[in-house]
Image (spheres, grey):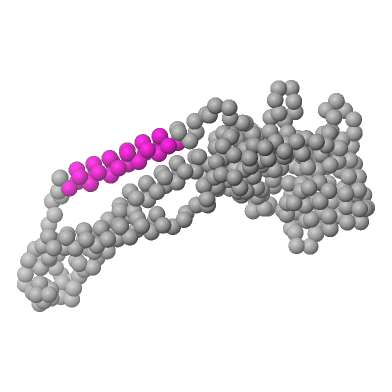
Amino acid sequence: MAEEETTREGARTKSPEEVRPRGQASLAQMIIIGAIASALGIALGLIINWFPTPASTQAKKIDTLYDVLIIVSVPVFVLVTVVVLFSVWKFRQRPGEELADGPPIHGNTRLEVIWTAIPAIVLVALCTYAYVTLTDIEEAKAGEQRITVIGQQFAWTFEYPQGAGKQPLRSNQLYLKENQPVQFIVKSRDVIHDFWVPAFRMKIDAVPGITTSYRITPNRRGNYDVVCAELCGLGHALMRQTAHVVTPSAYDAWVKKLTAPPAASPGGGAPDGKTLFTQGNGQSTACGACHTLADAGTSASTGPDLDTGLKGKDAAFIKQSIIDPDAVVTQGYNKGIMPNNFGQTLSAAEQDALVSYLQKATGG
Ligand code: CUA
């Protein structure tokens, strides 16, 4: 108090060094405020639930890394902020000080060495820890399953190898065995997408022309969102599917169910409409990735529900809906979302097979 009085009255006559507070008390105040703010900041940073429930072994390690980063970086942020705000308050210009100048400063070598060395040590330590974590979560595991993930406007297709000499199983559903390490081989058929399952904490771009990949070991049963994390066109926000992490026996049952209806025989013969609907043909996205159809057992909602949308429609209308999807758009849905290249990616025979299957399945 006394010091402030002196300051206000004596600014014009006293030298700046006498006017300004001398520091020791201010420093102590600042350290106390900083320590309290850091403790609160760290507590808050750790209490907030930043991510969805972790569902892979990688997720746990990434979350721990994140927590360590919060513990280290919050005090740095608080330190800088407290020093700035404290200085603005403590050393502000008071009435009568308009012409006063601060004390001359010639630098402080010891301080400069300290504030260069400490951040350098902190940075090197954090980078080393992050690098070790990255190598750890990217490590190949024995007996891992490889699943090919194909991005295409606007759905993901998954290919499951079925052993030597067999065609891979193709589906728009992602099923994973609990505790089975898996490597995703990620590709794109058109533009850049990004394959992201937040619960697994891993994501990577699907880039046309190259193959990318990442590994995870799902360790928690449940259903998790599969999200496209790269703006890829009008349907980007709808490019969402589900990752099902199930027991090995439930996985085998799912594979059995998927392979039960004989797929279009590779050696020729008429294409099977239902298989085309649920799996696509290798070029086209499967219809079931976006549409609900009771007969095919699909329940996606990106596009209109076909059980009601195609009910009683004739073959011509169904064919137009497939190859020229924007000609008639169901109310509540937008143009430009359904790919308009099915006329090229499906052969004439495949188009006919799909049309007659859809007509039959929707009671037309
Ligand atoms: Cu695919 Cu966004």
Going by the image, does 193 lie left or right of 101? right
User: In the figure, residue 196 lies in which quadrant?
Assistant: top right
Q: Position of residue 11 (x, y in %)?
A: 10, 72
In the displayed structure, 288 sits above or below 333; it is above
- Confirm whether the magenta stretch covers residue 116: yes
Which percent across, then down, holds residue 306? 82, 54
Is residue 152 or residue 295 the one in the foreground? 295
Residue 146 shows in this picture: yes
Q: Position of residue 83 (x, y in %)?
A: 25, 59
Task: State the residue at coordinates (10%, 72%).
Answer: 3
Magenta-colored span? 111-134
- Residue sitting nearer the eye, 217 or 293: 217
Residue in the picture at 48% in, 35% down: 137
Q: Is residue 214 visible?
A: no
Give the answer, above or below, for where 278 lies relative to 38. above
- Residue plotted at (63% across, 40% down): 247
Residue at (71, 28) in percent of width and height: 162
> Which quadrant would residue 330 be assigned to in this image?
bottom right
Residue 212, horizontal then vertical, whole percent: 58, 34
Within the magenta stretch, is there residue 349?
A: no
Residue in front for this viewpoint, 10 or 28: 28
Magenta segment main secondary structure: helix
Left or right, 17 with respect to 126, comes to left
